[in-house]
Every structure is written in structure tokens, then in C-alpha cells.
Image (cartoon, rainbow, N blue to C red):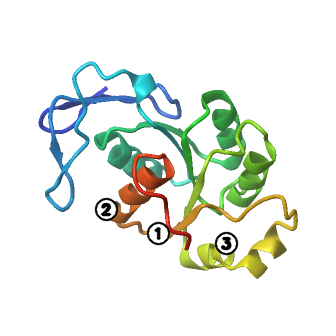
Amino acid sequence: MSICGDLGLALRRTRRCSSLAVHWGPRAGPDGASVGLLEPGRALEDMKKVLIVDDEQSILIYLTTVLEDTGYATCSAIDGQEGLSVARRERPDLVCLDVMMPKRSGVSLYEEIKRDPDLRPVPVMFISAYNQIRDLRDPVAFRKMISDTSIPQPELCMEKPIKVPEFLEAVAKLTGEGPPPEKD
């Protein structure tokens, strides 16, 4: 358990979707604007759930904190194998995915998500290094990685290090809390 911010309380459990973020008033975002305004007693099931899959613990902690401080429930996994298990169990509203990970790559996990009838509708945002993201954005390079034409290109690709305002805007759009995302 950790105290999180001036007027907020966050209970976090590592690698589970049992995270709870309840803020009793507005919180200031990076640009000073109000973010994460949640009413007291807002139920966890009313919150959009984001699964973060990355093998770097610092990235998991950072993205979890950013998302929970903005009013999202989060799940996390340290590799693609665990990510698939968590996605099937928790049914997130969005998956944020690194490309290069041990045990199972992000591209392999993405293929499996898009082949699973229950997970296929879940939007996926890749967050990775420029070279990896460049290949996912390019239709020809993407088809060299994933030849199955029934699998679409990812909804969004974002380079590390992320810019928090753009990241939160993309998350809002992809979870249906904002205008539709623009394709890269």
C-alpha cells in the first residue's frame, strides 16, 4: 500500500488487475491541468482497465503510476507469456505492449491477442524503441513480421520515452474516453 498524491489513495498489487485508484478531487497533470477527477466511491468495475506488458520494471511502475493517477485501473505483466495469461483472465480495455521481451515477444503476443476471438477487439498500443516501432508502422515491414493478413496493424505505436500528455490522450481515445485515435 502506498499514499499517492495530495488528496488521493492508491492501493496497488503488483501484476494484478486488482489495482484501485480513488481520488477525492482533481489532481494536477504535467501541464498543470486537472486530471483524474473521480468521485468518492467510484467502483473499480467502472474504471477502464489497461494491461501494461513490459520486461522493464521501471517502465511498469512509471506507466502504472501515470495511469492510476489519471483514473485507470491497471494490470501488468513482465513478459509476453504472462501478458497473454493476464489478458485472458482480466479482459482489459487496452493493452500497452513492449516489442522485445523474454519468453515471448510483444509481436508474438500481439498475434495471439488478435487471433483470440474474445481479445481481438481489444486495442493494442505498442510502446517501444524507434527502430521497433518503425517496422510496426510500415505496412510492408509489418507483413514481414506477421504474414497473416487477418491480423491488422496495431491501433497505435508510441516511441519510448513517452510524452505523458500524448500517452494519456492516446489511452483516452483507445479506451473510448476521447475522440477516435489517428493512425500513425
Q: Position of residue 8 (x, y in %)?
A: 19, 32
Label whose residue precedes the other's in the sequence (2 or 1) = 1
Three-letter residue code for mark 3:
Leu
Question: Where the N terminus falls, by quadrant?
Answer: top left
Question: Where 171 sits versus 23, above or below?
Answer: below
User: Relative to the observer, which residue lies in front, 22 or 160?
Assistant: 22
Label 1 SS: loop
Q: Position of residue 150 (x, y in %)?
A: 84, 58
Pointers 2 and 3 in contact (C-beta within 8 Å): no
Q: Residues within 10 Å of mark 1 (few under 14, many from 20)?
A: some
Q: Position of residue 163 (x, y in %)?
A: 35, 67
Task: Judge left or right: residue 143 versus residue 60.
Answer: right
The residue indicated by pointer 3 is 136
Label whose residue precedes the other's in the sequence (2 or 3) = 3
The residue indicated by pointer 2 is 165
The residue indicated by pointer 1 is 160
Q: Whole-Å distance between the Cαs marked 2 and 1? A: 14 Å
